[in-house]
Image: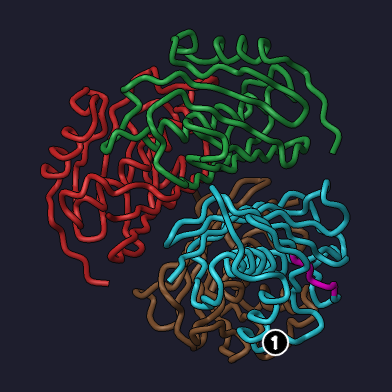
Chain colours: A brown, B cyan, C green, D red
């Protein structure tokens, strides 16, 4: 699978800011790196992300997994904001300690109509994954 | 499978308000009905829930699926806030039009350590599902 | 969602026999009922289906979940054998005791290009589910 | 996550042969390599594995994904045949051409009671994945 980029990290960030009403918030996820088949996204920590037990909440992690896959897809297909998630499978691996949340998204398959991404999330260390997701996007 | 309730809808709502920092917001999900094996949850619409295309965003729907399963589990096991999601599988079936979001959660299996819930979500009409989720909770 | 059938149970059975090399075996799954949005499939028990612990093996259950969804899709779209599974999510709920395996498949969403089916499997009693699956088919 | 092995490839193969009635067949999957956190499994091709379109069938791929995860778990926990799959999520990425099927299983998380494995499957080339699975095992 030979992949090439249509947008760099700043291009994707600009698209995301345009797409979401709260895209300019300081707690909105930020794409820090894109390469063929790969994107890194970070979401700055805020304590409203916590659930009982002082762990990052599941919906916060799922939202970031979805955004990281969206960013990866946009980097490869360009300005196609109408790409939509068709499925997301999330496996929670261990409690996510409070801290900035990192997501690495890898392209498993980029077809003309569908993209399948593998996403890994962590707060402490990339070797201590908090969650893994498989996200499928439908491309318009 | 014979199921019995430990909490009614108001009991679950009280727990959720205690558990989440923004649990008293007017846009926080509200449990409207619980019965053995079943819970109904509604989240009032707010336009910050939209994504490009003026549809309810995926993370909003996933967050509600998770909350509905959590509410269903708490109704059956009582005050065990440390129940945690171990996996969530979300299938997006059609675009969710703006409006209050409804979630019906059904218990597929309640074991001592694990609960598996089927959740269906819609805004327009229960026959026009926007998404279906299978959510697994680990019970402490 | 208004659904109508293109094939009855015997029509689907005939298609499946044509499609699979071992489709005439006495242990091949058999469609026993189809209705708009719903199909019932049974696979006769054989002890080669067992795994350690004398339970029906996971792959046997997954294979039947896939076949039940395929049967449901074919019943609604007709002779389109090239429909292919795009994803299958299986939740094992309790050990499946030896016995004929029953699968009920329900259509969650039938689009032009994609079908999403909910499948429930049991051996003892439909109230004691052995597994639940969500199966997505791509329609050519 | 520091992982260490309890069994080598031959030890796992011996366990699998003992566990399954058809474990000595020449078409039964064979573990070719294990290392901490990783196992490689190959299933020799046979034309009974085909589905319409002359592609490897979905159930064949799912069965191998499950076996590869089982082999990976057994390599790390030893002779615990009663480990059971609790969920399996399969994403079909492209049609699998006829040929020996390869599966690489990686450990995402090994807890005391649960193991989560990422499995990739291919026939032609490891860069052209036919499918990706996430498999969760419950450890007795």
Q: Which residue is mark 1?
A: B22
- Residue at x 56% of width, y 89% of height: A45
- Residue at x 46% of width, y 43% of height: D131
x and y, in percent, of residue D140 in the image = 27, 55
> Does the segment drawn in magenta span residue B43?
yes
Front residue of A47/C79: it is A47
Range covered by the magenta-colored residues: B41-45
Horizontally, residue D68 falls left or right of residue D31, namely right
x and y, in percent, of residue C137 in the image = 63, 36
Residue B119 visible, this angle: yes
Front residue of B134/C55: it is C55
x and y, in percent, of residue B18 in the image = 63, 86
Main secondary-structure element of the magenta-colored stretch: strand
Crowding near pointer 1: few (<14 within 10 Å), some, many (20+)?
A: some
> Does the segment drawn in magenta span residue A77?
no
Up/down of A140 relative to B80, above or below: above
- Residue at x 74% of width, y 62% of height: B40
Q: Quadrant of residue D20?
A: top left
Front residue of C14/A105: it is C14
Q: Quadrant of residue B67?
A: bottom right
Q: Which SS class for mark 1?
A: loop
Up/down of B40 relative to A15, above or below: above
């Amino acid at each position: 699978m030979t992949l090439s980029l249509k947008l760099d990290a700043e291009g994707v960030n600009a698209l995301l800011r345009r797409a979401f009403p709260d895209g300019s918030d300081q707690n909105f996820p930020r794409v820090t790196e894109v390469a063929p088949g790969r994107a890194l996204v970070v979401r700055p920590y805020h304590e409203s992300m916590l659930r009982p037990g002082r762990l990052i909440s599941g919906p916060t992690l799922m939202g970031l997994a979805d955004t990281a896959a969206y960013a990866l897809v946009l980097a490869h297909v360009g300005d196609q904001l109408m790409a939509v998630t068709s499925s997301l499978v999330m496996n929670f691996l261990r409690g996510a300690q409070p801290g900035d949340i990192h997501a690495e998204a890898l392209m498993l398959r980029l077809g003309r109509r569908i993209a399948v991404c593998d996403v890994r999330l962590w707060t402490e260390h990339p070797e201590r994954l908090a969650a893994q997701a498989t996200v499928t996007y439908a491309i318009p």
